Amino acid sequence: MNAAELRRCEDAGVRDWNGPVADLEHAAHEAHLRYAVVDLGRVHDRSALFRELDRALALLPHFGHNFDALADVLEDRDWLGKRGIVIVLAHASGWRAEHPSEWATLEGILAEAADFWCERLVPFWVFVA
């Protein structure tokens, strides 16, 4: 993945990533996008998931620590601004396997946010590492 590819919001969304996350960080910096790592290795339940998302993404103070609130805040320009973002869900395989229903919900919310931002020409990338 390179900076030019990250600038194309039409291709953005939730993607699996098998390479070094440092490559994503470098490309995000070159593309002038925000970069955040959500460490799912720290997450063992739903409340920890929302705490980690809040910590890593610096969500707005009114974030209600539930999936509906997450969907709302991810589509808030006050949170994202105009630059776009690259989010890495690090150490995702364990949490994904242990919480398949919550994973599906999270993945759906992130994919919807990517579509929302693409309509506004703002790249919103999520890489599952």
Image (tube, helix red, strand yellow):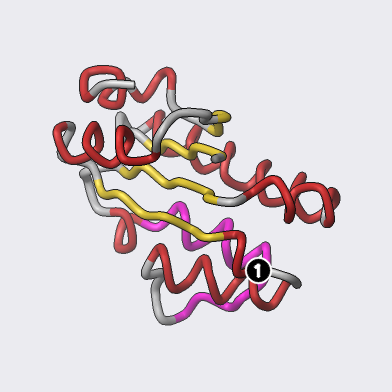
For the N terminus, the quadrant is top left
Query: Residue 21: x percent and y percent?
Result: 39, 40
Picture quarter containing residue 110?
A: top right
Query: Residue 12: x percent and y percent?
Result: 44, 27
The correct choice, above or below, for 35 with respect to 19 in the image is below
Query: Residue 84: x percent and y percent?
Result: 29, 42
Q: Secondary structure at mark 1?
A: loop
Start-end of magenta stretch? 62-76
The residue pinned by badge 1 equals 43
* Mark 1 Cα-neighbour bin, 10 Å: few <14, some 14–19, many ≥20: some
**In the image, is 98 to the left or to the right of 63?**
right
Q: Residue at x 63, y 47 (%)?
A: 109
Tally of numbered tags: 1
Q: Residue at x 51, y 75 (%)?
A: 63
**In the image, is 38 to the left or to the right of 109?**
left
**In the image, is 20 to the left or to the right of 80?**
right
Query: Residue 47: x percent and y percent?
Result: 69, 78
Q: Residue at x 40, y 63 (%)?
A: 57
For the C terminus, the quadrant is top right
Q: Amino acid at mark 1?
A: Val
Does the segment drawn in magenta span residue 125? no
The correct choice, above or below, for 51 with respect to 13 in the image is below
Q: Residue at x 26, y 21 (%)?
A: 2
Q: Residue furthest front?
A: 20
Q: Toward the viewer: 80 or 17?
A: 17
